[in-house]
Image (tube, rainbow, N blue to C red):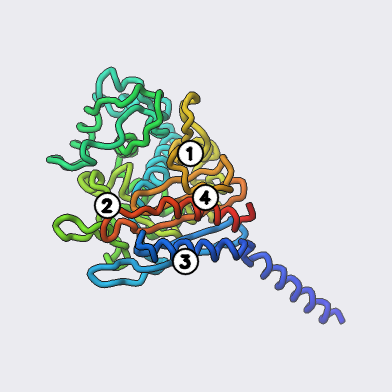
């Protein structure tokens, strides 16, 4: 009798454990999300994509769709495909490294830009602080002239050109999304951190989080066949493993505003860390709770309607991936190559979309897909 009771108890425990690990994401919105991505592929807005939807502790849904490459020969896409994540570099890498340096007492986010880059501009830029750079309220224009084209190369030239730009608005007076802000932040991170941003990111971020496929300059770590190609250039060359952003390319592929290559699985690890208040899956703390708050809650000048954390978008014209159900406290970012990343601390859910919508040429529009997936991810999480 005792043996039978023990066996019954073991069976019950096994069944309970099985239930505990079964996904509680609602299946209908997940099927709709799959169909939405397939629809945009069918409309030739992107050749392929990978998608990850998760509610932490309640299961995940992840898939690959379409083709990794469509020319010169089609290649099927799988979840191990590495994508150029474009401006996801800003919050995932640069803003995180700023906070890690702040925690070490090496950076003050309230300090003026010119403390860390002496000689960067004159009196007109004296009011620019790191906070204003991080929240895109510095007054600097959106990019370097002609998006980095022209007769220059290297980080020294990028710094010289950026520091010589005329302000588009007074510091703190206007929201203007700007690559220049994060170009300068990346250069500050390297000067203060004492090594290049790719090495800092590998040592302080990717390796501790187990983000084994993430980094800059992916051809140094893997074969081109794993990497989704992007645009066909005017000379016929197809970029593959070289960053799509022309300014980042001229800076050697390692910059504060672009250059990250990654997978949805790696970004899911990053998302879980943020939603756990800075604690990695192995229990180690990567970021302090204060750093997470600075990254993900409003830090913009209070008079601005557009609100950003010190890295992540909260309420701006670029917040399309929030969809219609995620609350105002959710946050995220997008990338020009066809990437969207949105996280909700309330439900502890998130979604990541990586694609190469600029392959083989630009001119596509996946913005409606971002909003659709945000709404479906929220529905899947029970919102």
* Residue 53 located left or right of residue 334: right
The answer to whether marks 4 and 2 mark residues whose Cβ atoms lie closer than 8 Å is: no
Regarding residue 290, the answer to whether it shows in the image is yes
Taking the view exactly as shown, the residue that stands out farthest to the front is 43
Residue identified by numbered label 3: 63
Residue identified by numbered label 2: 244
**Location of the N terminus (image quadrant):** bottom right
- Up/down of 38 relative to 157, above or below: below
> Which mark's residue is nearer the viewer, 1 or 3?
3
Q: Within 10 Å of the Cα at label 2, are there few (<14), some (14-19), or many (20+) other Cα atoms? A: many
Q: Nearer the viewer, residue 79 or 281?
A: 79
> Which mark's residue is nearer the viewer, 4 or 2?
2
Q: Position of residue 101 (x, y in %)?
A: 41, 37
The mark nearer the N terminus, 1 or 3, is 3
C-alpha span from label 4 to label 2: 28 Å
Residue drawn 27% across the image and 65% down it: 224
Residue identified by numbered label 4: 273
Q: Secondary structure at mark 4?
A: helix
Q: Within 10 Å of the Cα at label 4, are there few (<14), some (14-19), or many (20+) other Cα atoms? A: many
Q: Nearer the viewer, residue 36 or 174?
A: 36
The mark nearer the N terminus, 1 or 2, is 2
Q: Quadrant of residue 223?
A: bottom left
C-alpha span from label 3 to label 4: 22 Å
Q: Within 10 Å of the Cα at label 3, are there few (<14), some (14-19), or many (20+) other Cα atoms? A: some
The mark nearer the N terminus, 2 or 3, is 3
Q: Secondary structure at mark 2?
A: loop
Q: Quadrant of residue 257?
A: top left
Residue identified by numbered label 1: 295
The mark nearer the N terminus, 1 or 4, is 4
> Which mark's residue is nearer the viewer, 1 or 4?
1
Q: Position of residue 131 (x, y in %)?
A: 42, 29
């Amino acid at each position: 009798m005792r043996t039978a009771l023990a066996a019954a108890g073991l069976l019950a425990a096994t069944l309970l454990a099985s239930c505990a690990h079964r996904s509680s994401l609602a299946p209908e919105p997940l099927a709709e999300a799959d169909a939405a991505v397939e629809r945009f592929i069918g409309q030739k807005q992107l050749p392929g994509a990978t998608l990850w939807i998760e509610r932490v502790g309640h299961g995940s849904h992840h898939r690959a769709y379409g083709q990794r490459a469509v020319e010169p020969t089609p290649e099927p896409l799988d979840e191990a495909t590495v994508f150029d994540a474009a401006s996801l570099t800003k919050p995932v890498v640069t803003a995180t490294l700023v906070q890690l340096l702040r925690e070490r007492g090496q950076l003050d986010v309230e300090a003026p830009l010119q403390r860390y880059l002496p000689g960067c501009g004159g009196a007109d830029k004296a009011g620019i602080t790191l906070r204003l750079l991080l929240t895109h309220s510095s007054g600097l224009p959106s990019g370097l002239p002609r998006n980095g084209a022209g007769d220059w190369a290297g980080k020294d030239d990028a710094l010289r050109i950026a520091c010589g730009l005329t302000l588009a608005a007074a510091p703190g007076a206007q929201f203007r999304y700007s690559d220049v802000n994060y170009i300068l932040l990346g250069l500050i991170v390297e000067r203060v951190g004492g090594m290049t941003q790719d090495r800092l990111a590998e040592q302080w971020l990717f390796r501790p989080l187990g983000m084994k496929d993430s980094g800059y300059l992916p051809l140094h770590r893997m074969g081109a066949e794993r990497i989704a190609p992007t645009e066909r250039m005017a000379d016929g060359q197809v970029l593959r493993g070289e960053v799509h952003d022309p300014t980042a390319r001229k800076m050697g592929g390692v910059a504060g505003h672009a250059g990250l290559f990654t997978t949805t699985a790696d970004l899911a690890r990053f998302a879980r860390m943020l939603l756990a208040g800075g604690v990695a899956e192995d229990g180690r703390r990567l970021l302090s709770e204060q750093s997470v708050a600075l990254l993900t809650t409003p830090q913009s000048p209070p008079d601005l309607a557009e609100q950003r954390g010190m890295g992540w978008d909260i309420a701006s014209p670029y917040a399309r991936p929030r969809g219609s159900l995620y609350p105002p406290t959710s946050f995220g970012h997008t990338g020009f190559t066809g990437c969207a990343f949105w996280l909700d601390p309330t439900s502890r859910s998130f979604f990541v979309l990586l694609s190469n919508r600029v392959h083989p040429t630009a001119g596509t529009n996946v913005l409606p897909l971002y909003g659709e997936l945000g709404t479906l991810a929220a529905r899947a999480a029970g919102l």
